Image: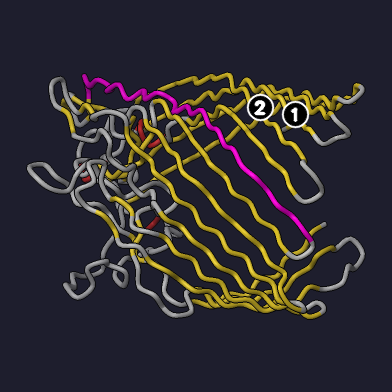
Amino acid sequence: MTFQFNYQLANHAIVLGYWTEKARHRQTAPGQQILSSDPNDPLLADRVVDRYLDSPYAWIRNADGSINNTRDQLTRSTGKSLYVSDTSTYFDDRLTVVIGFRHSGQNRDFNNFANIGAAGAFNGFGDYRIQTTAIENLPSLGISYQINDNNQVFVNGARTFRVPSNFIFQNLATGGTFINGIYSNYRVQDRNLQAETANNFDLGYRFSSEKLTGSATLFYSLFQDRLASAFDQEEQRITDINVGGSKTYGAELEAGWNFYKGFTAYASTSYTLSKIDSNLQTGANTFEQTAGKQYPDTPIWLGALNIQYTIDSFYIFAEGKYTGRRQATLVNDQSVAGYAVMNLGAGYTFPTFGWLKTTKLQAVVNNATNQEYDYLNAGSGGGFTTRSLGPGGTQPNYFIGAPVSFAVTLSTEF
């Protein structure tokens, strides 16, 4: 829900607003019955009784009739943000200054209901509740100057923050004993991680003409209490940890070219270094050698190229994307190779009809060359670990890239 007030005062466009959002997130993981034991089906794909969790009657039950869960939790989150901004222009609108301030926060109410916990341990067996609050003041400043009709320079600065995921509160019951079948006298471990904050800056140049557009940008981000979503071997799950401070800096280049009668091309590349500031403390007197290492799953090189031909309302395109080598552990003792994929597509844009605008029908062949590749992030968190070699080392979790696939989409705007 958003409330916003806009006011124009001379050359100042002032915005004052308030945003709030409430979310209720219920997460369970009921045990599944297996039909048989088949060593040729290690993923159990063909032997799970209720693959899509549609039938509670097929789930495994405890002796008291309750569902045998390895996860059973309810998270209520409330986000709030009070913001104000002032956009002003000077020198015949060539100079634009945007000053902003945002007071943001999130309240989280996590409830764990007794379950067997990760990997069958008892660390989820106890009921417990954890409530946290994160609040941060987030200033921002943006300045751009239009040198002439074709050239512009800009500089921006902004502070951001991010709270840990609710997964950090799983499996925290420890030290208890079973009394008459009830897990009792346990304590709840402290896992109240700090919110990640960052000061972000960029400086750049833009060019625009009838046939050619382009930009060049230098960027620098200074993180405090940076969050890493990594795989925990002991608990067999992805969780968040604070890795301390880090710096991310580099450059981006992009260009577009309308080069011949309906043919257009777009290319971009980026070079990124993301270095961890200090060694990661893992115990009272133990550290992992992470200082100066590249932050995992951050490719140094990225690249993209798109060529499209448009005639009237019909278009076809081919695009290639390159992702460079990424480190797979915090100490950089294992990495995953870079890869390139190609996508092919065609589409048709329909004329405006009533309240339907920019209606498009598009068909795409993804990974048209069926390139085989691995990656570390499945969207819900990274699969990297602290280290892979030496005593206690843990191999990263890799995800297999999608093979060639075909998709048809229909989209519109109102």
- In this rendering, does residue 65 appear at all? no
* Disc 2 residue type (three-letter): Leu
Q: Is 190 colored magenta in this rendering?
A: yes
Is residue 346 positioned above or below 140 on the image? below
- Tell me what residue is drawn at x 88 percent, y 24 percent: 7
Q: Is 300 colored magenta in this rendering?
A: no
Is residue 152 positioned above or below 89 on the image? below
Residue 290: horizontal and vertical position, in percent? 24, 35
> Which numbered marker is on residue 97?
1
- Tell me what residue is drawn at x 43 percent, y 47 percent: 272
Left or right relative to 394: residue 71: right
Q: Nearer the viewer, residue 4 or 389?
A: 389
Residue 359: horizontal and vertical position, in percent? 79, 68
* Disc 1 residue type (three-letter): Val
Q: Nearer the viewer, residue 398 or 275?
A: 275
Stretch of the chain drawn in magenta: 184-209
Residue furthest left in the image: 391
Labels 1 and 2 touching (C-beta < 8 A): yes
> Which numbered marker is on residue 141?
2
Quarter holding the C terminus is bottom right
Quarter holding the N terminus is top right
Is residue 271 positioned above or below 10 on the image? below
